[in-house]
Amino acid sequence: MANKVKKIVGTKNVERISATTKYRMSAEVAIKYFKNPQTAVFASAESFPDALAGGPLAIKLGAPLLLVNNSRSDFYPVKTYARIYGVKKAYILGGPTLVEDLTVKTILVN
């Protein structure tokens, strides 16, 4: 698909970012484009309207939009990113059943 896009837009400035899960994908995008964030926007990967609505907020804040759920194994890539890149402040999109306070606390506490 990337080659087809390159052909259509007439440029080689097309890059594919891939990952094995949507959680890892959000962390990979953050690694690529947000090297020194103090803030991150968290949204449940199970509720796409929250993540979709959070895009403009993340842009305004200059922050990555990280997808999470309440399973420790799923949010591990996001926790690793937050620890390595020093995320200290979080905006949480969605209610506490989708993104539990404990989940965010676990991600942000080193």
Image (spheres, rainbow, N blue to C red):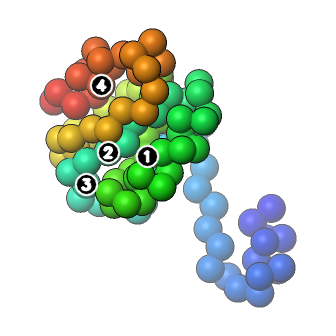
- Asked whether residue 13 is in view, the answer is yes
| Residue 98 horizontal/vertical position (percent) | 48, 18
Q: Are marks 2 and 1 in contact (CB under 8 Å)?
A: yes
Give the alpha-carbon distance from disc 4 to disc 2, as whole Å: 11 Å
Q: Is residue 48 above or below residue 27?
A: above
| Residue 83 horizontal/vertical position (percent) | 22, 39
Amino acid residing under circle 2: Ala
Q: Quadrant of residue 101?
A: top left
Q: Nearer the viewer, residue 107 or 7?
A: 107
| Residue 65 horizontal/vertical position (percent) | 43, 46
Residue at the spot of label 2 = 40
User: Which image quarter is the N terminus in?
Assistant: bottom right
Amino acid residing under circle 4: Val
Give the alpha-carbon distance from disc 4 to disc 3, as whole Å: 16 Å
Q: Are marks 3 and 1 in contact (CB under 8 Å)?
A: no
Q: Quadrant of residue 108?
A: top left
Residue at the spot of label 1 = 65
Q: Are marks 4 and 2 in contact (CB under 8 Å)?
A: no
Report the residue at 17% width, 41% height from top: 88
Q: Earlier in the sequence, mark 3 or mark 1?
A: 3
Give the alpha-carbon distance from disc 1 to disc 4, as whole Å: 13 Å
Residue at the spot of label 4 = 104
Q: Quadrant of residue 11?
A: bottom right
Q: Earlier in the sequence, mark 2 or mark 1?
A: 2
Q: Nearer the viewer, residue 109 or 90?
A: 90
Q: Quick one: SS at disc 4? A: helix
Q: Quick one: SS at disc 2? A: strand
Q: Are marks 2 and 3 in contact (CB under 8 Å)?
A: yes
Asked whether, in this view, residue 57 is left or right of residue 108, the answer is right
Q: Earlier in the sequence, mark 4 or mark 3?
A: 3
Q: Residues within 10 Å of mark 2 (few under 14, many from 20)?
A: many
Q: Which mark is residue 37?
A: 3
